Amino acid sequence: MPVFKIKHITNYKYESPVRDSANQIILFPIKDEWQKVIKHDLNISGSPEVDIFIDYYGNEIGIFTQSEPHNQLKIFSKIYVETIAKPFPQDDLPVSKQWCMLEDIKYEVPFVDYLKQEYFEESENLLQKVMELMDENDTPYQTAAKFCNYIYTEFEYIKGLTSVDTTLNEILRLKAGVCQDFAHILTTMLRFVQIPARYVSGYICPNKDGMRGEGATHAWAEVYIPEYGWLGLDPTNNCIASENHVRLAVGRNFSDCSPVKGVFKGASGHVLEVTVSVGLDDDEVMETENYFQPKEINYSKADPGLPAKNSYQRYMDALMQQQQQQQ
């Protein structure tokens, strides 16, 4: 059961002072029986008040605003997290029964969003490939593993070729990309055959064999297996996501899981710098303590007497407050 030390620094530098920025962060690791957060230090320049809540998909979300003019926004996250290996699926139920179980749950609330398929120009070509790979004797798990292997073998891993705005059409035409691109393709292929699939953001941590995307932010997919639950599949490395994968968030796509995003009032020009380092021991993690002087963050708790709001409502409240300040 390894304990990983992860530092994630996000630094926005603006060409001129900006103000009234409203920001959302998803930098809080998922806490469950397979992942234990031992310690989490989160520091933000300017020491804004951070409102923390749980979104529709079960992710821990932080929202904060900065009304005063500022030239930089620096977010420093340092986590100590213990991971526990999850057992592989036994996959011993009859094939037909497993597919029938997936058919029975496709209209249930927890799975509806993970089965919705977006339209894109290359969808027919990708669907054709999916049908070629399908075998009536394969279980959902075997099908998902086959799709994962297809992406790993047929798409080239090239950094800098794509961005978060790159579309599925572009990725499929390039036949190349990085982890987030491959995760999007895998979820799409799985949804074509009515297997619930969700996008996962997080980190991939070092192991003795080395992995693509190691020591950085990472993305993969989780597939729902009957009578087992959610299983992580990493098409970038053609493996099951296990104790070397630290999960931050799950959702339909990257937009639901973006570590940091927001809006501000001011000139649009800015530079974004992101630094991530991962290690098993303190001396393995890049020393970035002096990157900026961290200050204790102030957490605001929801009033138990008020009805809970979802992430969309909280974010819209922040934007409304910003618009009122501009008037």
Image (cartoon, grey):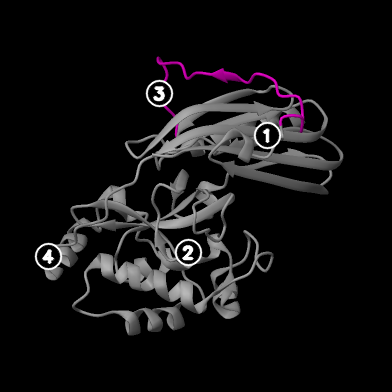
Between tags 3 and 2, which lies in front? 2
Q: Amino acid at mark 2?
A: Asn
In the picture of the structure, the residue carrying the numbered disc 4 is 97
Image x and y of residue 51, in percent: 55, 25
Disc 4: CA contacts within 10 A as few (<14), some (14-19) or many (>=20): few
Q: Earlier in the sequence, mark 4 or mark 2?
A: 4
Q: Secondary structure at mark 4?
A: helix
- In-front residue for pair 256/324: 256
Q: Amino acid at mark 4?
A: Lys
Is residue 175 left or right of 127 when viewed as pictured?
right
Q: Which residues are magenta?
A: 289-310
Up the image or down, 297 lies above or below 104; here it is above
Q: Distance between the Cα atoms at labels 4 and 1? A: 48 Å
Q: Do the residues bearing badges 4 and 1 touch, measured as CB atoms within 8 Å?
A: no
Q: Distance between the Cα atoms at labels 3 and 1? A: 29 Å
Disc 2: CA contacts within 10 A as few (<14), some (14-19) or many (>=20): many
The disc placed on residue 75 is 1
In the picture of the structure, the residue carrying the numbered disc 3 is 307
- In-front residue for pair 16/73: 73
Q: Amino acid at mark 1?
A: Ile
Which residue occupies 44% across, 38% down?
59
Q: Distance between the Cα atoms at labels 3 and 4? A: 41 Å
Which residue occupies 58% across, 68% down?
167
